[in-house]
């Protein structure tokens, strides 16, 4: 798997005329090398794949990055990288422009001297967009753990608990059942706070007769799941059911019609047009979805600006919402993978309008 990823990256480098690429982004480094340590630099050329790391990882790195030469770098890592480049007569080095600060860039330019730094954008990220069979199985397992977490929390939550108490129980459940951690800070937003799209759990005491929105995920074997469900704790008002049904209609419509070959913008319209038709367009201010994988937000985007064409193997979320200030909000989210003919839905937790 590592070698095929190296080969694919070399193909992309050749297309851009790059003789060498320095990978510094931690997710990209892990993806392309298999190395899970917290510090390291990957250098890819036409003939060599090198992982530079420090003393702490000199036993771990060769065991994980089996297709790489592992070099213990100097106190200043760029000195070791410069020595390797000079030894290979490399005069141009691609770097990940989205990962380097300006201060780091200027330090590299000073230390590398005559070696020209060439900015690159998204070379490894483009490879990461298409998941292989192993990645998809891990993501299915992460999604199933999120489903089980939602089922569990419905048996736990009661009026009088704080949002933080509920979120903590969800996080404990995921960790007890195999997650490394959560994919992101767990959102439990109740009552009027459910109108906050990213209202992370707070000390607010959950009341009766109000929405509770859960947005959470499990980080499992380096991959994320991302699930949102909204319930009513207590007795529902007509308004609760009205906006829930609209969001559900929009989400189900998108799941039925998303196909490979459409753009992220076209996928976004599948939910946005329905919510707008019901008169709530101004209360749906975020995109329909985002890519999912080693990071909770990655390419492609299902949004008004989503120009990427959806292809088989891409994993994305579908998460329309309506948020009414002072009342509450609904979001319903599933994780899907684009297939040759449509989609496969990874998350299976119930979306039935639920009151407890």
Image (cartoon, rainbow, N blue to C red):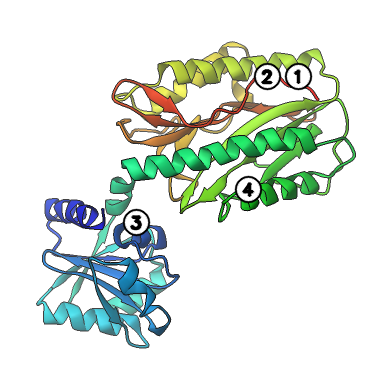
- The residue labelled by disc 3 is 31
Is label 4 in contact with label 2 (beta carbons under 8 Å)?
no
Residue 240's label in the rendered image is: 1
Residue ID at (14%, 81%): 86
Relative to 278, is 262 above or below? below
Which circle, 3 or 2, is nearer the viewer? Answer: 3
CA distance separating discs 3 and 1: 43 Å
Residue in front for this viewpoint, 252 or 58: 58
Tag 4 secondary structure: helix
Quarter the C terminus occupies: top right
Q: In the orientation shown, which residue stands out farthest toward the bottom?
A: 75
Is label 3 in contact with label 1 (beta carbons under 8 Å)?
no
Left or right, residue 312 beside residue 162: left
Residue 174's label in the rendered image is: 4
Q: Position of residue 299 (x, y in %)?
A: 39, 42
Residue in front for this viewpoint, 170 or 321: 170
Tag 3 secondary structure: helix
CA distance separating discs 1 and 4: 29 Å
Which image quarter: residue 105?
A: bottom left
CA distance separating discs 4 and 2: 27 Å
Mark yes or no: residue 249 visible: yes
């Amino acid at each position: 798997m590592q070698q095929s990823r190296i080969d694919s990256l070399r193909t992309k480098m050749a297309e851009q005329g790059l003789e060498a690429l320095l990978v510094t982004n931690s997710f990209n480094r892990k993806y392309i090398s298999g190395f899970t340590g917290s510090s390291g630099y990957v250098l890819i050329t036409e003939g060599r794949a090198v992982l530079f790391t420090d003393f702490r990882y000199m036993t771990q790195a060769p065991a994980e990055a089996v297709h790489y030469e592992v070099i213990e770098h100097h106190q200043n890592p760029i000195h070791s990288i410069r020595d390797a480049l000079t030894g290979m007569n490399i005069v141009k080095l691609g770097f990940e422009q989205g990962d380097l600060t300006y201060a780091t860039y200027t330090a590299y330019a000073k230390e590398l001297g005559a070696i020209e730094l060439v900015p690159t954008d998204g070379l490894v990220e483009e490879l990461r967009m298409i998941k292989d069979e192993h990645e998809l199985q891990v993501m299915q397992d992460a999604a199933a753990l999120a489903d089980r977490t939602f089922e569990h929390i419905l048996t736990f939550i009661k009026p009088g608990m704080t949002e933080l108490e509920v979120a903590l129980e969800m996080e404990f459940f995921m960790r007890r059942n195999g997650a490394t951690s959560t994919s992101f800070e767990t959102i439990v937003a109740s009552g009027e706070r459910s109108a906050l799209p990213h209202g992370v759990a707070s000390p607010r005491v959950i009341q009766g007769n109000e929405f509770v929105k859960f947005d959470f995920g499990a980080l499992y074997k380096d991959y994320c799941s991302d699930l949102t469900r909204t319930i009513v704790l207590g007795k529902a008002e007509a308004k609760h059911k009205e906006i829930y049904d609209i969001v559900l209609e929009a989400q189900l419509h998108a799941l039925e019609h998303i196909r490979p070959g459409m753009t992220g913008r076209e996928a976004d319209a599948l939910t946005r047009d329905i919510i707008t038709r019901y008169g709530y367009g101004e209360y749906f201010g975020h995109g329909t979805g985002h890519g999912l994988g080693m990071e909770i937000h990655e390419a492609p985007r299902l949004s008004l600006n989503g120009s990427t064409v959806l292809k088989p193997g891409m994993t994305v979320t579908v998460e329309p919402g309506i948020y009414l200030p002072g009342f509450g909000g609904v979001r319903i989210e599933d994780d899907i993978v684009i297939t040759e003919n449509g989609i496969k839905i990874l998350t299976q937790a119930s979306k039935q309008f639920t009151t407890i």
